[in-house]
Image: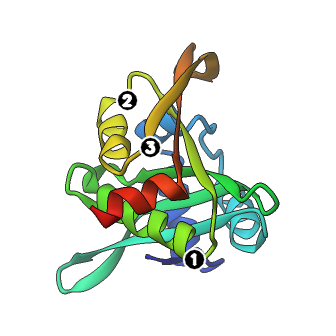
Amino acid sequence: MRPLTTTDIDRDLVQQLFTQPSTARFWFHPPFQNPKDAAKFVKKHSQSNRIISMVIQAPVADDLTEVGLIELVELDSIARTGELEITLLDQFQGKGYAQIAFAQMIDFLFTYHNLHKIFLLVDVDNAPAIHIYQKQGFTIEGTIKDQFFASGAYHNVYYMGLTQKQYHKITAD
């Protein structure tokens, strides 16, 4: 992983991520209409002090390739909490990259940013993501009804959380 930057490579990655249907369905963010939308997103997310954006890289043909994005948004430095989000390009899903990036990001957030709690919202129908989150120690703390509108319908989401104390207990075992 590396920090998101305002380079063309990162803008193009974000444009690809937010125009693929799988991201629009589960990220709950409308697809970008043009490259300017992606450029605005990248500028905001790479410069905000309330967002930590990392580009997920994977080895492809003896080089590192940009395959996704993982972010902590809504960073609250007083409560020491934030919401975690992740999305991968479709062709790189199911290869373990999300699980690796998730583990690295969680460690980074608890170790270097001393967060108290990381939470996320996940569509109740997104079984692969729920599985990854639970493997990382996140637990379902509740269901929020009709939270997001995507693909022509409202969707329920699970609110899942992981505290620093839980994380250290899991990683110590």
Q: Earlier in the sequence, mark 2 or mark 3?
A: 3
Of residue 133 and residue 69, the one placed in the foreground of this image is 133
Q: Answer whether labels 1 and 2 touch (C-beta < 8 Å).
A: no
Badge 3: residue crowd in 10 Å (few <14, some 14–19, many ≥20): some
1 or 2: mark nearer the eye: 2
Look at label 2 and name its amino acid.
Asn
Q: How is the image coloured?
A: rainbow
Q: Position of residue 118 (x, y in %)?
A: 58, 51
Q: CA distance from mark 1 to mark 2?
A: 31 Å
Look at label 1 and name its amino acid.
Asp
Residue bearing the label numbered 1:
8
The quadrant of the image that shows the N terminus is bottom left
Residue at point 55% right, 42% down? Answer: 120
Residue at point 20% right, 56% down? Answer: 95
Residue bearing the label numbered 3:
20
Q: CA distance from mark 3 to mark 1?
A: 18 Å
Of residue 113 and residue 155, the one placed in the foreground of this image is 113
Q: Answer whether labels 2 and 3 touch (C-beta < 8 Å).
A: no
57 with respect to 91 (left or right): right
Q: Earlier in the sequence, mark 3 or mark 1?
A: 1
Q: Position of residue 50 (x, y in %)?
A: 76, 63
Residue bearing the label numbered 2:
126
Q: Position of residue 59 (x, y in %)?
A: 24, 77
151 with respect to 42 (left or right): left
Q: CA distance from mark 2 to mark 3?
A: 16 Å
Res 88 quadrant in image? bottom left
Badge 1: residue crowd in 10 Å (few <14, some 14–19, many ≥20): few
